[in-house]
Amino acid sequence: GQQVMQIPQYQHVQEGEDFTTYCNSSTTLSNIQWYKQRPGGHPVFLIQLVKSGEVKKQKRLTFQFGEAKKNSSLHITATQTTDVGTYFCALDSGTYKYIFGTGTRLKVLA
Amino acid sequence: DGGITQSPKYLFRKEGQNVTLSCEQNLNHDAMYWYRQDPGQGLRLIYYSQIVNDFQKGDIAEGYSVSREKKESFPLTVTSAQKNPTAFYLCASSIAQNTEAFFGQGTRLTVV
């Protein structure tokens, strides 16, 4: 079946440093979504990417969809302590069935 | 306020007992989902429902059952057949395919 690999599994950064997480699929995707889950909380939708090569920005967050639509990345510029949490990519298998990646847990050291 | 409500937030049960987790949404969404999350792990799909009176197994459906008698409600029963039920359970809904999923606050189930 479809597999969604996310790397790295963990990342500790000093406040102000940049952070990137990558999501790789074994199959071509129709779209990809990104979610953030704060410690002890629930996942919250961040963005959806649909087009090949698409780049979207939300303040310090930059989301990219690969040209072949098999991978995606989330980059955070100048991390802050509020960025702490786990970032998940998720893809729709085509039948309402969202498959989540394993997540990248981000820790920001002040 | 529109949203998804899961109850209870914490649940303790004895081994061998069935337990039902509640999930209600007033977003008028057709699709609803149940996920399981283990410590430090990702989300694994248990069951999903695209429409009332219809539901499909996800990747880890064994030991779980659901019903979808009303659009607003999608309860999950963790049966005694589930070998390792202690986990964080998340319910979600979406208005349609290829749209964002909205999650409830989750229920943390501990079986002792």
Image (cartoon, coloured by chain):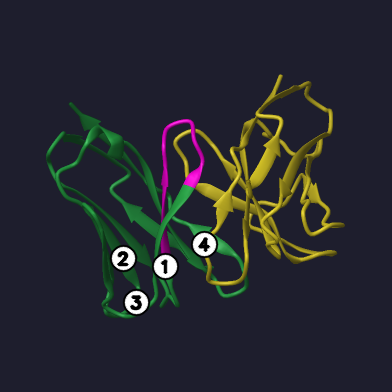
Q: Mark 3 packing: few (<14 Cα in 10 Å), some, or many (20+)? A: many
- The secondary element bearing badge 1 is classed as strand
- The residue that disc 3 covers is A69
Chain that bears disc 2: A
Q: CA distance from mark 4 to mark 2?
A: 17 Å
Chain B, colour shown: yellow
Q: Which residue is pictured at 43% across the width and 50% down the height?
A: A102
The numbered dot on residue A72 is 2
Q: Are marks 1 and 3 on the same chain?
A: yes
Q: Are marks 4 and 3 on the same chain?
A: no
Looking at the image, which residue sits at the far front?
A: B1
Q: Which residue is pictured at 42% across the width and 75% down the height?
A: A27
Mark 2: amino acid: Ser
Mark 3: amino acid: Lys
Mark 4: amino acid: Glu
Query: In terms of sequence position, does the residue under pointer 1 or pointer 2 come before the other?
Result: 1
Left or right: A100 with respect to B4?
Answer: left
At which x and y percent is residue A103?
Answer: 39, 48
Q: Mark 2 packing: few (<14 Cα in 10 Å), some, or many (20+)? A: many
- Mark closer to the observer (1, 4): 4
- Mark closer to the observer (4, 3): 4
Position of the N terminus of chain A by quadrant: bottom right
Q: Quadrant of residue A33?
A: bottom left
Q: Is residue A69 magenta?
A: no
